[in-house]
Image: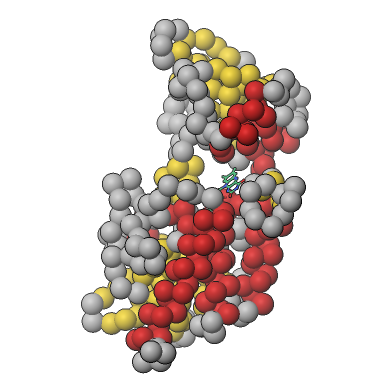
Amino acid sequence: MADELLSKQDIYDVIITGGGPAGLTAGIYTSRARLFSLLIEKLGIGGQAAITDRIENYPGFIGGISGPELVHSMGEQAKSFGMRTVFGEVTRIEVSDESTIKKIFVNDDPEPYQCLSLIIAAGHEQRKLGVPGEKEYAGKGVSYCATCDGAFFRDLSVAVVGGGDVALEEALFLTRFVKKAHVIHRRDRLRATKILQERASSNDKIEFIFDSVLDEISGQTTLDSVKVRNLKTGERKDLGVNGVFVFIGWIPSLSFLGDIVEKSEDGYVIVDKEMGTSREGIFACGDCCKKNLRQIVAACGDGATAAFSAQHYVERIKGEEYV
Ligand SMILES: Cc1cc2nc3c(=O)[nH]c(=O)nc-3n(C[C@H](O)[C@H](O)[C@H](O)COP(=O)(O)OP(=O)(O)OC[C@H]3O[C@@H](n4cnc5c(N)ncnc54)[C@H](O)[C@@H]3O)c2cc1C
């Protein structure tokens, strides 16, 4: 999907910030409803799903589907209905009580895109460990994506930090390449779904280190060791690994929003059941919202609902609502 040359004079019916499953589904619905729709994405189409090797729980695909394939189709589908796309990072949003027009600033361009309604679909980002060595070795042994970097660790040992679904999915994926994946988890049991726990426990290449945290990442010339501390005994030991994969949770990517809409204590957008935010004309969907289930099917559902709400809002302010 190419970056399009678009006029900043246009006023879009809807701008969608973020091109993951939530934003793409919103785009399919708004453009199919013949709203003048623009999606702005800072990296590449597909969000987290684009870096997921295999998705087994998205309905309709027995045996699963590759993440990149699924989101590529979503993007093409939205485009086929007329959704436009721009690649760049939304850095600021300006709204005023006097006008229904919202101004969306991208990168450091002083001239904004303009829209009547805004759908925030910016997802969230991996939380960092915050230990010595993490920054220094980022991209040189420390990774937050097994699908992207796993193949660099063929026949080597790695540490995987975390105990949820993503940590186990990624550890299982890594076993295609690595000699050993040491899964380090701070508690004495995993949070991941049972089917993933069963698969990981029966995989010879995966070894669990429970009740423990990773304190430090180090190496002579390249990353070759981590310090692991047992939280119950206080014992510290060196573990020889060549890579560290971190999956310890998430933080929302919403700094561009400032305090324009109400957020939860942990920084997620608070939405009602129609995906409306505390500000009229601004909707949110997917992983950037305060909610319990962060999965593709849920993000798509949110995206469709947000699009429907945006459609009604736009029709209302244009005086075109069918009542
Ligand atoms: C390794 C892994 C495995 C997973 N496995 C599964 C699975 O098997 N099944 C499942 O259902 N779910 C799975 N998930 C979760 C699923 O991928 C997410 O729930 C889903 O992608 C959320 O979609 P989203 O559109 O809300 O957010 P995201 O996918 O995070 O997309 C948000 C998009 O917004 C963009 N963005 C952020 N800020 C800005 C900005 N300022 N300007 C412009 N663009 C911006 C980002 O670049 C990104 O492309 C997995 C996730 C990971 C990481």
Residue 119: % across, % down: 43, 68
Of the 4 image quadrants, the one containing the C terminus is bottom left
Image-quadrant location for residue 90: bottom left
Whether residue 90 appears in this view of the structure is no
Tell which residue pokes out farthest to the bottom in this image: 319
Q: Residue at x 62, y 15 (%)?
A: 240
Figure disc tally? 0
Q: Residue at x 57, y 54 (%)?
A: 296
Image-quadrant location for residue 24: bottom right
Residue 295: % across, % down: 54, 50
Judge whether 262 appears above or below 312 on screen.
above
Judge whether 210 appears above or below 296 on screen.
above
The structure's colour scheme is secondary structure
Image-quadrant location for residue 141: top right
Judge whether 264 appears above or below 72 on screen.
above
Q: Residue at x 55, y 74 (%)?
A: 29
Q: Residue at x 34, y 86 (%)?
A: 317
Judge whether 218 appears above or below 62 on screen.
above
Residue 71: % across, % down: 65, 60
Q: Nearer the viewer, residue 255 or 171?
A: 171
Q: Nearer the viewer, residue 151 or 209?
A: 209
Residue 40: % across, % down: 51, 68
Tell which residue pokes out farthest to the left in this image: 97
Q: Nearer the viewer, residue 107 or 301?
A: 301
Instruction: Please give left or right for residue 298 compared with residue 180 in the image.
Output: left
